[in-house]
Image (cartoon, coloured by chain):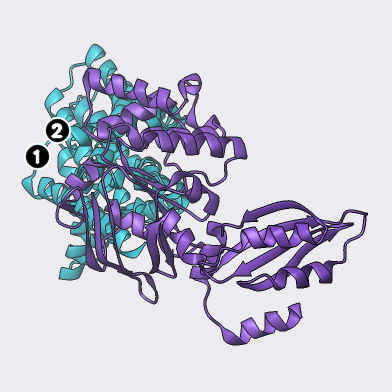
Chain colours: A cyan, B purple
Amino acid sequence: MRNALIICRKELRSYFVSPVAYILLIMFGLIFGFFFWNALGYFVIEGMEMQMRGQMFAMNLNEQIIRPLLQNVSVVGLFFIPLITMRLFAEEKRTGTIELLVTSPVRDLEIIVGKWFAAMLLYSCMLLFTAVNFAFLFKYGNPDWKPLLVGYLGLLLQAGALLAIGTFISTLTKNQIIAGAVTFGVCLLLWVLGWVSGYESATWARVLAYMSVITHFESFGRGVIDSKDAIYYVTVIFLGLFFTARSMESLRWRS
Amino acid sequence: MINVRELTKRYARTTAVDHISFEVAKGQIVGFLGPNGAGKTTTMRMLTCFLPPSAGTATVAGFDVLERPLEVKKRIGYLPETPPLYPEMDATEYLKFVGKLKGLSGAELDKRVDYACERCAIVDVKHKLLGRLSKGYRQRVGLAQAIIHNPDVLILDEPTAGLDPKQINETRDLIKGLAGSHTIILSTHILPEVEQTCEQVIIINKGKLVATDSVRNLQARARGAESVVVEVSGRNGGLDTPVVQEKLQRVAGVSRVSCKQQVDSRAVFEVESSKGALVRGDLARAVVESGWDLNELRPSAMSLEEIFLQLTKTEDPVEKAATQGEQQ
């Protein structure tokens, strides 16, 4: 555990010493800021129109702003995750520092968990940007905070799953670009798999749809913790980290 | 301290290390010698638990590399061929990180970092980014990293590769200074390095153990026949080389005389004699009595270089005959 923290601190340091972390945070902040501004503007105009027409439908910040925005974050995250994980192992393999880690009295699993956790923390920093935006809703309105928290939990679980997959892919190559590109492809694929269920209802389609990372976020976005979805994410996290460990082991048998 | 039995590493098509056995006693410096691709790095990687052996066993400080890797890793300081540095860290940060990984903490960690910096002479670049350091300094930071946790065993893979002559000397002195408190294995393909730093040599070639002995024994062993270098000059500006050669040849016990080089009236001969025959006195007398000057008379020690070539040479009669033909 102590070793995992040492590795984690080192990874976080190299994210924040290089421009990587700042560029990711700024880009994500900009994109989310735009989404927020857009959703809020739409919400305000809709409200005014209703008043003018004299119709009184219930307006709901949670349903009309927070939920779609969280859904957006869950998709935008797909694009950022490869950028976070691509260097984790590829870079160490390229520069040979992996030899230092592996010949230190540290277990493989501690190295893997440390690196994965550092990636999680960087992603959490990105989520903090969204929290700043949501804070305005709480200042000027009174949305329910519980669904928001559940939404965040869902985002973290989803990111954890994708980051674990990205970490695994990063162990397969010395080249960051390859690691990033493959992770990106896999992330996209895991998103679009869910679309099958739209026109096909056979068993294979349901299996494919179940594998999609985004569909499992829907319940969290609504503020509902569905154990089926939580189990999916946790399973993918464990599988990803397990394959990373196997891959590290095979690295030694092959190299 | 290190015990290697029938260690073997096989890859899909090749055998990188083939049934190697050797032992290293505590506090020794051992030179691991071999041409490029001989299996030095692979053997070292197996000792550091980076690669698992295909067959055979290796123990470090009594712990098997396969069964108790964590215990082995705690006791080993390893400098790979390229120092494993993170370019975005400075030297102190880096050493602290490695120290923590090796289980140090608190005041002890700070103490060891200072010690390693001082020992490896990197105090003046302590706060420079590792990515900006010169090759020599990188190597030293790599060495500092290896000794940070005061390991029993140091494994250094070509610690002087790519350094300039001054740095090479400094690094060698540093390694010599570390002996005694650590058991050291260092690999190299540079022979004088072994002659100068090591007590014991392990020579491998194509994955097989060729010789393991002390430097002095190896030299003695390879020098099958005694050989003496004689430099002679003529008194009055002229020297008839064939005459001298014949004269030397006639000395009792001499088996072969060859003229190595001749400049004006000076000539250098190499005289070989059968083992045990004491010919030096007779040689001197023969030269002086013939009216020539004897400028130099010394036994020629075979350098490790020659021994190495002799031991690692693949016997190929056709090729050998061809080269001899060319010479003639």
> Which residue of the protein is positioned furthest toward the left in this rendering?
A227
Q: Are marks 2 and 1 in contact (CB under 8 Å)?
A: yes
- Inspect this view and state whether residue A129 appears: yes
Q: Which residue is mark 2?
A: A150
Q: What label sits on residue B96 in the rendered view?
A: none
Q: Secondary structure at mark 1?
A: loop
For the view shown, which residue lies furthest in the top direction?
A139
What percent of the width, then of the height, locates residue B169? 55, 37
Identify the residue shown where x is 88% and y is 62%: B239
- Ranked by sequence position, the earlier of labels 2 and 1 is 2
Q: Secondary structure at mark 2?
A: helix
**Image x and y of residue B291, in percent:** 83, 58
Query: Front-most of A32 and B5?
Result: B5
Query: In which quadrant is the C terminus of chain B drawn?
Result: bottom right
Looking at the picture, how far across and down is residue A175, in whole percent? 46, 52
Image position of B253 (left or right of B175) = right
In this rendering, the answer to whether B75 lies above or below A183 is above
